[in-house]
């Protein structure tokens, strides 16, 4: 759309606007200027703002989707595809923590919010699906409706709204404004912790004729709660910025404009558009946000009082910093504004530097053995910066390994469990951890070793064959003789089935073979890197993802029922034992451990069951979550199966019930009870277990009624 003189008159009459916190503070002590041509004004504008400095970045793209962006109507060039490519390139280069994509033509058309857009396929799909097929350019009204929700309180639900093209212009604007109020742009961080950069990309001017009219000044003032480092860039594509917009940009303290020739795609980090936040973790590879020839000023904060620029400050596109802080710090890097005929309201260029010489992830167990055989695993433990959503962490780049992530809600510690599953001997893989708020983090490499064994694959169930098609012709109607013969056959089959059921009730028959029992755990290895591993009777070693700071139940964490009740916690000097069940023995050499003992790293412990109720390998099946020991509580026809972690209740209806088959617990197969009136009788017990009265040594025999409380002893 072409410029209009009406906009010129509107902006020329608009007074200067003042935003909160606009007044610059004096230059901080220790600010280093690397060029003698820098003025005192530039030094003053490079003062760090007060309050909490931002730690996250958000980029807001407000994109014109009117037809002129494709050269339709009064458009000068088909620029839309190149603009989308520029947006995509900016996101990949700068990797903001959040991005908002808004489109407009005859009012605000759509709004979408994305976390980690550089690694978010939804962002790529949304950007690629955009089309410039709208009419009119309600620029100021749309800009106001786009900036207003940025003042809303944090909301973790992404929002997207679309105006109906069939509505009138006024109705579209009202709908967009209402939708914006109801669905604010999502923010995952507290107010003030996010640095926002806004790009307005349009090839037109405001042609909104609805009333009341929205001025350019009102549109820019809609972003009321912006931070002192937030910026807005108005990029005019192949058109001039009208006088009213120029006046509004000059009156603002956070907005500037840039005009580009027709058909020229924008480069969104070109000179004059720099800004935002740059995190430096490797001082030797710190890309400079400014050209090599730009005169720079650096103002450090109190956490890095000696931080300064080298001479020259930039070489080959790399920033050169001296006297970096020992851990972390912040500084404001500034350059003079870029002036020229195509720049409107040029402002000093400021980039907030976050210097963190420590790795974003602290590796807690660097001594872990990262050579795994098939079926073995390694656990890598890391501590993360505070405030990261560890529950959203993902892992990639692990061919030949099974990977699991373990994290406590709201915690900072993350355990990466990697199990060998097809990793060739000598082959190394480097897992990559992705956590929202951090760039992808390569972890320690894991190398395959010869030997080991994989668990047998699960046998897939054979699907039932469906009925065979017999063709389209209708079946012949059976004769009377055929019906009588079928009826007799059905009655005979029913009698045989009833007789066979009685035979099975009288004497248990051959049962389906039980699955192989798991290998019992006979030892615990507390490694030098403070991780725990289970040692099986066959020599297999498997790690347990135990927390580093909280008490834990080893049986529950490792899903080993006969270790239930063994509680411990990480201590300054090692592993503190908190509780040992009376029917479990944990030994260090010839000495039995007691609650309160501290096990030093590099110790091998022995584990033995002291009672038969804690058999080391019962296959509990669906009852595995109950733990051991198991007890049966009989209340008439209702039977309760209880363990230390839960309870399962069932009502016995049939005269004879096999508890193992009914409860899908192979270890209980053959343990059958009989319903006699309202009492339960023990009908049969297999050789692998016995029932005894709780608190006594009385063993129940077939035909005896179940007591109110009976304990299950596994004999092997």
Image: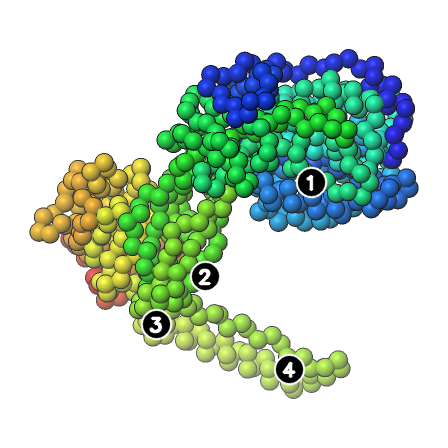
Q: Locate the C terminus and report the quarter of the image it occupies.
A: bottom left
Task: Say which label, 2 or 3, has the lower sequence index.
Answer: 2
User: What x and y, as percent, mark residue 572?
Assistant: 23, 36
Question: How far apart are the alpha carbons under marks 2 and 4?
Answer: 62 Å
Residue depicted at x 62% and y 76%: 467
Counting from the top left corner in percent of width and height, residue 228 is at 60, 21
Mark 4 and mark 3 residues within 8 Å of each other at the beta carbon: no
Q: Disc 4 or disc 1, which is closer to the eye?
A: 1
How many angstroms separate mark 1 from mark 3 (CA)?
70 Å
- According to the picture, the residue beneath numbered tag 3 turns out to be 513
Residue at which label 4 appears: 483
User: What is the secondary structure assignment of the residue under circle 2?
Assistant: loop
Answer few, some or many: residues within 10 Å of disc 4's Cα (few below 14, many 20 plus, some between 14 and 19). few
Percent x, y for residue 89? 65, 45
Q: Mark 2 vs mark 1: which is more N-terminal?
A: 1
Query: Tag 3 or tag 1, which sits nearer the N-term?
Result: 1
Mark whose residue sits in front, 2 or 1: 1
Residue 177 falls in which quadrant of the image? Answer: top right
Out of 179 and 668, give the one closest to the viewer: 179
- Closer mark to the observer between disc 4 and disc 3: 3
Q: Which mark is residue 267?
A: 1
Label 3: which secondary element: loop
Taking depth in this image into account, of 385 and 90 the one nearest to the observer is: 90
Residue 399 shows which numbered tag?
2
Q: In this rendering, which labeled residue sits more in front, label 2 or label 4?
A: 2
Point out the frontmost of discs 1 and 3: 1
């Amino acid at each position: 759309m072409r410029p209009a003189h009406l906009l010129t008159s509107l902006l020329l009459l608009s007074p200067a606007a003042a935003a909160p916190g606009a007044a610059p503070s004096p230059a901080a002590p220790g600010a280093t200027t690397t060029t003698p041509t820098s003025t005192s004004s530039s030094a003053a504008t490079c003062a760090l703002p007060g309050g909490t400095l931002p730690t996250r970045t958000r980029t807001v793209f407000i994109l014109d989707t009117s037809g002129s962006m494709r050269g339709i109507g009064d458009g000068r060039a088909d620029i839309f595809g190149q603009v989308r490519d520029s947006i995509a390139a900016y996101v990949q280069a700068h990797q903001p923590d959040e991005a908002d994509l808004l489109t407009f033509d005859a009012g605000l058309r759509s709004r979408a919010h994305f976390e980690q857009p550089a690694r978010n396929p939804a962002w790529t799909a949304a950007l690629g699906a955009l089309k410039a097929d709208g009419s009119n350019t309600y620029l100021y009204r749309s800009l106001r409706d786009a900036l207003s929700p940025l003042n809303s309180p944090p909301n973790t639900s992404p929002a997207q709204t679309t105006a109906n093209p069939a509505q009138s212009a006024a109705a579209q604007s009202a709908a967009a404004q209402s939708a914006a109020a109801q669905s604010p742009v999502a923010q995952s961080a507290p107010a003030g912790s996010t640095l926002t950069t806004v790009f307005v990309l349009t090839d037109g001017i405001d042609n909104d004729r609805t009333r009341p009219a929205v001025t350019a000044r009102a549109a820019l003032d809609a972003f009321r709660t912006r931070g002192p480092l937030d910026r807005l860039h108005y990029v005019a594509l192949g058109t001039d910025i009208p006088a009213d917009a120029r006046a509004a940009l000059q009156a603002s303290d956070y907005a500037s404009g840039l005009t580009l020739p027709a058909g020229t795609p924008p480069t969104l980090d070109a000179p004059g558009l720099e800004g935002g936040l740059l995190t430096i973790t490797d001082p030797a590879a710190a890309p400079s946000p400014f050209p090599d020839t730009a005169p720079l000023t650096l103002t450090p904060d109190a956490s890095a009082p000696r931080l300064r620029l080298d001479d020259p400050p930039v070489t080959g596109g790399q920033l050169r910093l001296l006297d970096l802080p020992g851990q972390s710090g912040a500084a404001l890097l500034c350059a003079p504004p870029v002036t020229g005929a195509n720049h409107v309201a040029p402002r000093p260029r400021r980039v907030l530097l976050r210097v963190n010489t420590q790795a974003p992830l602290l590796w807690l167990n660097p001594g872990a053995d990262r050579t795994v055989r098939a079926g073995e695993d390694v656990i890598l433990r890391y501590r993360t910066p505070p405030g990261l959503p560890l529950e959203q962490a993902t892992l990639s780049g692990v061919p030949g390994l099974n990977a699991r992530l373990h994290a406590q809600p709201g915690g900072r510690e993350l355990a990466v469990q990697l199990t060998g599953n097809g990793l060739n001997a000598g082959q190394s893989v480097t897992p990559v951890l992705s956590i929202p708020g951090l760039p992808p983090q390569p972890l320690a490499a894991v190398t395959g070793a010869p030997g080991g064994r994989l668990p047998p694959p699960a046998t897939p169930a054979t699907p039932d064959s469906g009925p065979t098609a017999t063709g389209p012709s209708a079946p012949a109607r059976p004769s009377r003789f055929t019906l009588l013969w079928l009826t007799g056959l059905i009655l005979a089959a029913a009698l045989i089935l009833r007789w066979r059921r009685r035979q099975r009730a009288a004497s248990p028959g051959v049962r389906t073979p039980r699955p192989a029992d798991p290998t019992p755990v006979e030892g615990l290895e507390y490694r030098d890197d403070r991780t725990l591993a289970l040692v099986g009777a066959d020599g297999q070693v498997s790690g347990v993802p135990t927390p580093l700071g909280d008490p834990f139940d080893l049986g529950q964490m490792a899903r080993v029922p006969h270790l239930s009740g063994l509680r411990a916690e990480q201590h300054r000097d090692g592993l503190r034992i908190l509780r040992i069940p009376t029917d479990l023995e944990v030994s260090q050499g010839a000495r039995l451990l007691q609650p309160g003992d501290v096990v030093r790293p590099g110790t091998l412990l022995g584990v033995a069951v002291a009672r038969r109720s804690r058999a080391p390998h019962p296959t509990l099946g669906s009852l595995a979550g109950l733990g051991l020991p198991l007890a049966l509580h009989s209340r008439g026809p209702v039977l309760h199966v209880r363990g230390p972690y839960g309870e399962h209740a069932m009502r016995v209806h049939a005269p004879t019930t096999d508890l193992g088959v009914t409860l899908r617990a192979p270890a209980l197969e053959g343990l059958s009870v009989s319903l006699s009136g309202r009492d339960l009788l023990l009908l049969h017990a297999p050789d692998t277990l016995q029932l005894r009265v709780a608190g006594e040594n009385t063993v129940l025999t077939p035909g005896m009624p179940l007591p109110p409380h009976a304990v299950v002893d596994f004999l092997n």
